[in-house]
Image (tube, grey):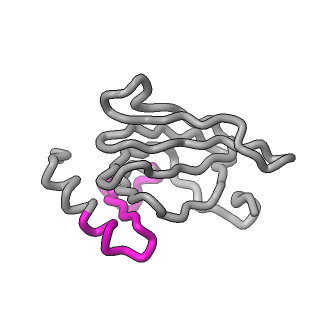
Amino acid sequence: MKITQALLDELTSQAKASPRLRMNFDLRNSSEDNSQLMLNAIEPGSPLPIHRHQQTSETVVCLRGRLVEEFYDELERRCVEAVELSPGGPCMALSIPAGQWHTVRSLESGTVILEDGKYEPLSDADILH
């Protein structure tokens, strides 16, 4: 499969029309594949809870736009690090270790990321309230 600007444009269009202001596109070959390989178009203002993946790391690559990946401390529930990602900037990708509390904020309309990691459904214990 080719990841083209036309595909990213269509995904961005769907994200803008979605109440969540984001839309993902599954890149797996089949539903039996336990990975989490997807494109995720995220518009500014999209609500994404602070969460963690206890058993797997996650790789995030910014294909277009700009976003901030924020990392949180579980005890004090405060942001301890914020990393800006953009395709032409100093950081375009990062790996989030298993168990790390995090969230993402889109800084620019048209932002699309590639996410890779093992699929792990979030439970209530994996969302920082």
Residue 59: x %, y % from top left: 48, 38
Camera-side residue of 42 and 108: 108
Q: Quadrant of residue 89?
A: top left
- At 42% from the left and 45% from the top, the residue drawn is 115
- At 16% from the left and 45% from the top, the residue drawn is 2
| Residue 30 lies in the magenta stretch | yes
Per the rendered image, the range of residues in magenta is 13-35
- At 31% from the left and 28% from the top, the residue drawn is 88
Drawn side of residue 42 relative to residue 97, left or right: left
Residue 7: x %, y % from top left: 18, 55
Camera-side residue of 108 and 5: 108
Which residue sits furthest top? 90
Drawn side of residue 32 relative to residue 101, left or right: left
| Residue 32 lies in the magenta stretch | yes
Q: Quadrant of the C terminus?
A: bottom right
Q: Is residue 99 visible?
A: no
Q: Is residue 95 visible?
A: yes
Residue 60: x %, y % from top left: 45, 40
Residue 18: x %, y % from top left: 37, 74
- Relative to residue 118, is residue 22 depicted above or below? below
- At 37% from the left and 35% from the top, the residue drawn is 86
Which residue sits furthest right? 75
